[in-house]
Image (spheres, rainbow, N blue to C red):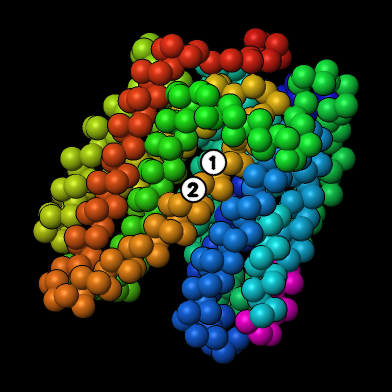
């Protein structure tokens, strides 16, 4: 396994794959008007394609793929996932009906569910605790970069050649990446039984027992899930700016995309790098760092909802709102993997992804929409302002759970550091 001797190259490869995953995932958003028209679907069906079908597949499969990644070759698991989602991205370009697109997107999500659990487990093995936050932050930089690139591709190549051709091209690129990746050997069979994950059901039950008995780990996962309530609010941000703050729809859409790309990426890098440098000096480590980061950013996030539209404070608060959630990815994943045995890291990552997608993204987005409709029906003059302020407060409340995790971690230190990490 010569490739494990170059952790930076592995990280760069995983970042590239993660970038491709989020381009494929968000391409429907970039081509929404064309796809709705060509497939003759309504807004509810489109919402199902970009929302429910993704959560139903990705959320459940992430944990299952995590159990496989803890037992078998992680490179092969990732390669299989890339092959599946790329083939189904290509198939999405051939879809002629809502049903065909729904099936294709279901399996795109299933394939992408293999990436994060396996990649997190692999990076946790290759990078020591001193560098793990940086590695995780750089890997999750694929999220804002992928979102930004999906809209960029839709507006350039997509505008010239159409959405179907763009989907075909992305599918071919993914298959071309999957084939050589599958050739990278990772023989997990040579590991001792105690270093390899159990079969799926036993592995899941073991992980749930670990989480139940490890307070610091449990609080960190709850806090990390809660921060994603911010993403539920983000789905309604443009609507809030246009309907309640009087901003131009076309202009603000471009601005949101650019600022999210820049400050989301900045958050991933800065959060990961800074957490590795600061966390080791703080009691409670990464959990304390995340608590302090949220406390520092919280006033600007709240002020953003009340500042005059277009003012300096308004844009500063918006940028901080884009920066903060991504800045937590590096330290949160570093903390979670450091508190988990090596043989459970991918499964725990999958469990975390499941909770995020179900409780924060799916239920959170529906709750925001339902609460807004309720306030509108009862005559509220600024329903979205009130609801989005609530999502901000809930996301900021994650600091409480990170603080509890920091306190508990002082009594329950990190465990199961792999010997390979001592030299990384």
117, 18: nearer the viewer: 117
Identify the secondary structure beneath mark 1.
Answer: helix
Residue at (51, 46) in percent of width and height: 355
Disc 1 and disc 2 in contact, CB within 8 angstroms: yes
Sort mark 1 into few (<14), some (14-19) or many (20+) by Cα contacts within 10 Å: many
Q: Is residue 282 above or below residue 287?
A: above
Residue at (76, 21) in percent of width and height: 195
Q: Is residue 179 left or right of residue 282?
A: right
Where are the magenta residues, as a range?
89-98
Give the number of the disc on residue 328: none
Q: Is residue 194 visible?
A: yes
Identify the secondary structure beneath mark 2.
Answer: helix
The residue labelled by disc 1 is 352
35, 162: nearer the viewer: 35
Residue 12, x across and y down, in percent: 64, 36
Hey, which quadrant is residue 194 in on the image?
top right
Give the number of the disc on residue 356: 2
Query: Does the magenta portion include 97?
Result: yes
Residue 140, x across and y down, in percent: 53, 41
């Amino acid at each position: 396994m010569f490739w494990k001797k170059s952790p930076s190259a592995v990280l760069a490869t995983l970042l590239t794959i993660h970038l491709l995953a989020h381009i494929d995932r968000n391409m429907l958003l970039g081509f929404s008007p064309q796809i709705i028209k060509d497939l003759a679907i309504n807004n509810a069906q489109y919402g199902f394609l970009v929302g429910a079908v993704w959560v139903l597949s990705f959320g459940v499969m992430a944990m299952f793929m995590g159990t496989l990644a803890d037992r078998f070759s992680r490179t092969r698991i990732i390669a299989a996932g890339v092959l599946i989602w790329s083939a189904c991205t290509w198939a999405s370009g051939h879809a002629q009906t809502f049903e065909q697109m729904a099936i294709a997107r279901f399996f795109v999500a299933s394939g992408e569910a293999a990436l994060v659990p396996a990649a997190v487990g692999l990076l946790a093995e290759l990078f020591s605790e001193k560098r793990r936050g940086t590695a995780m932050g750089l890997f999750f930089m694929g999220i804002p970069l992928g979102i930004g690139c999906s809209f960029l591709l839709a507006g350039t190549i997509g505008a010239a050649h159409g959405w179907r051709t763009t989907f075909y091209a992305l599918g071919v690129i993914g298959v071309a990446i999957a084939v050589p990746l599958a050739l990278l050997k990772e023989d997990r069979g040579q590991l001792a039984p105690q270093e390899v994950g159990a079969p799926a059901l036993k592995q899941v039950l073991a992980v749930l027992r670990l989480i139940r008995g490890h307070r610091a780990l449990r609080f960190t996962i709850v806090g990390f899930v809660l921060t994603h309530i911010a993403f539920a609010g983000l789905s309604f941000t443009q609507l809030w700016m246009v309907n309640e703050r009087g901003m131009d729809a076309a202009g603000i859409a471009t601005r949101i995309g650019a600022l999210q790309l820049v400050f989301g990426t900045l958050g991933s890098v800065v959060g990961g790098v800074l957490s590795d440098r600061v966390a080791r000096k703080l009691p409670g480590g990464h959990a304390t760092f995340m608590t302090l980061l949220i406390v520092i950013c919280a006033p600007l996030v709240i002020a953003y909802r009340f500042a005059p539209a277009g003012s300096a404070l308004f844009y500063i608060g918006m940028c901080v709102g884009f920066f903060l959630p991504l800045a937590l990815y590096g330290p949160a994943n570093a903390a979670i993997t450091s508190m988990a045995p090596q043989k459970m890291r991918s499964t725990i990552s999958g469990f975390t992804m499941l909770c995020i997608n179900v409780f924060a993204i799916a239920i959170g987005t529906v709750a925001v929409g339902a609460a807004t409709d309720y306030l509108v029906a009862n005559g509220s003059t600024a329903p979205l302002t009130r609801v989005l302020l609530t999502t901000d407060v809930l996301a900021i409340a994650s600091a409480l759970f990170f603080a509890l995790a920091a306190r508990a971690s002082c009594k329950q230190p990190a465990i199961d550091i792999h010997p390979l990490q001592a030299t990384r």
